[in-house]
Amino acid sequence: MRSKYLVKIVSSVVALVLVLLLWVLIVSEPDDGQVARSPLLGQPAPAIVTATIDDQPFDLQRRKGSWVVLNFFNSTCVPCINEHPLLVDFANREATNDNGAELYTVVNDDSDGSVRDFFSKNGGDWKKLRDENGAIAVALGVARVPETWVIDPNGLVRLRVTGELSAGLLEAQLDKLRDEFTS
């Protein structure tokens, strides 16, 4: 008799916990792209010297004076594929802005050919940077792709977004940074 009573109590508690977990899942917002902390925020960006997949030299130091957005990408990464149309829209918007950011894709563990094919099919005419041996990812502390970084015109790291970008997130964050930069 006592064990039946105990089973009813335990079952009721488990049911209550499951209902609470379900409620939390229903009311929580998905984490499509999150502004994340990094010890690099506010610090000079690491030295990044590499080549594009078209064998053109790239030196981040030479980009001083411009807002730079680095988006870490792999052509087989589903979140990278999902966010790509947002990046195409972002690049088009920035191209019409007098103080527009320069967007660069940092290729993460992928072949030049696969990246070229992806961009040929899906658009995006910005430069794609090789990350030989993952040195750029290590220097910035990239956890996984996609990940997006913003460097200000003074060469300071200003923003890190982990995971897939959500619509308008990058534009809103960059506009906020530009306002702070000119204040």
Image: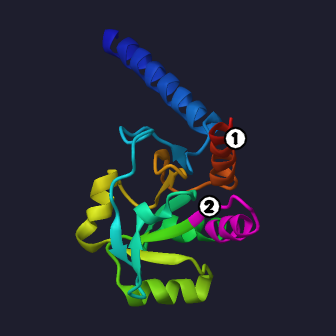
Q: Residues within 10 Å of mark 2 (few under 14, many from 20)?
A: many
Q: Name the residue under label 1.
A: 179
Q: Quadrant of the C terminus?
A: top right
Write the start and end of the magenta stretch as one range: 87-102
Q: In which quarter of the image is residue 61?
A: bottom left
Query: Residue 94 lies in magenta, yes or no?
Result: yes
State the SS at label 2. Answer: loop
Judged left or right of residue 145, residue 20 is right
Tell which of 64 and 151 is nearer to you. Answer: 64
State the SS at label 1. Answer: helix
Q: Mark 2 points at which residue?
A: 101
First in sequence: mark 2 vs mark 1: 2
User: In the image, residue 180 lies at what x, y percent?
Assistant: 65, 37
Residue 129 versus residue 25 in the image, above or below: below
Q: Which mark is residue 85?
A: none
The amino acid type of the residue labelled 2 equals Ala
